[in-house]
Amino acid sequence: MQKVEPMTLYGYEKLQAEVKELKEVKRPQVVKDIEEALEHGDLKENAEYHAAKEMQKIIDNRLAELAEILGNSQIVDPSELAHSKVSFGSTVVMTNLETDEEVTYTIVGGCESNPDMGLISFASPLAKQLLGHEEGDEVKFRLPGGEKEFEIDEVKYQEIVFECN
């Protein structure tokens, strides 16, 4: 069964840019570093050679990982989705029923998540528990700090800001 990776166009382009950087800049530099290290002779005690080979392995693994993610990606434009219920791209405003603290999260693709900015992956435990709920629902979450109960105040679409300026 193919695992679909929903993401915005921003996330897709960000991953493509990383692939381009790895293929056109970083990997050629590592190959050059390996060639230079080979010129030093004895490979058993050649730290530069071993470090460059390790870096090459890391880059190749990341390229394979990115190829799989991009191959399974499904670009979704959240502005075209209904947000009467929590779905991909929804911004959810909730109030902690115990502390009255208000929190806001936007559900995005895994490669786009940034919890410090309120962007959570659709695959995260919190997002999975939110999906399908609507304004007025009370939802109990099992979080690392224990169980917490929130009321969903608002479910909406708003333009997603992925980076701080």
Image (cartoon, rainbow, N blue to C red):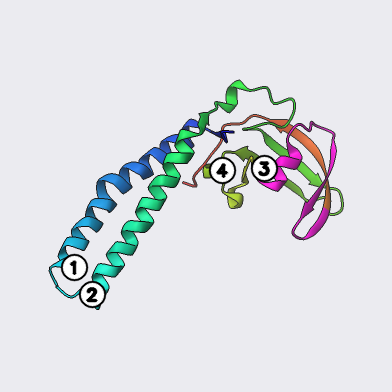
Please give the count of numbered marks on the rendered protein. Answer: 4
Question: Going by the image, does 49 lie left or right of 14?
Answer: left
Q: Which numbered tag is attached to residue 110?
A: 4
For badge 2, the amino acid type reads Asn
- Mark 3 or 1: in front is 1
Label 3 Cα crowd, 10 Å radius (few <14 / some 14-19 / many 20+): many
Give the residue drawn at x 74%, y 28%: 85
Label 1 Cα crowd, 10 Å radius (few <14 / some 14-19 / many 20+): many
> x, y (%) of residue 101?
78, 51
Question: Going by the image, does 88 lie left or right of 70?
Answer: right
For badge 1, the amino acid type reads Ala
> x, y (%) of residue 117?
59, 48
Mark 4 or mark 3, earlier in chain? 3
Query: Please, what secondary structure does the residue beneath circle 2 have?
Result: loop
Which residue bears the numbered disc 1? 37
Please say if 149 is above or below 40: above
Could you tell me how far apart the alpha carbons at marks 4 and 1 are, in whole angstroms? 38 Å
Query: Please, what secondary structure does the residue beneath circle 1 have?
Result: helix
Give the residue drawn at x 56%, y 43%: 110
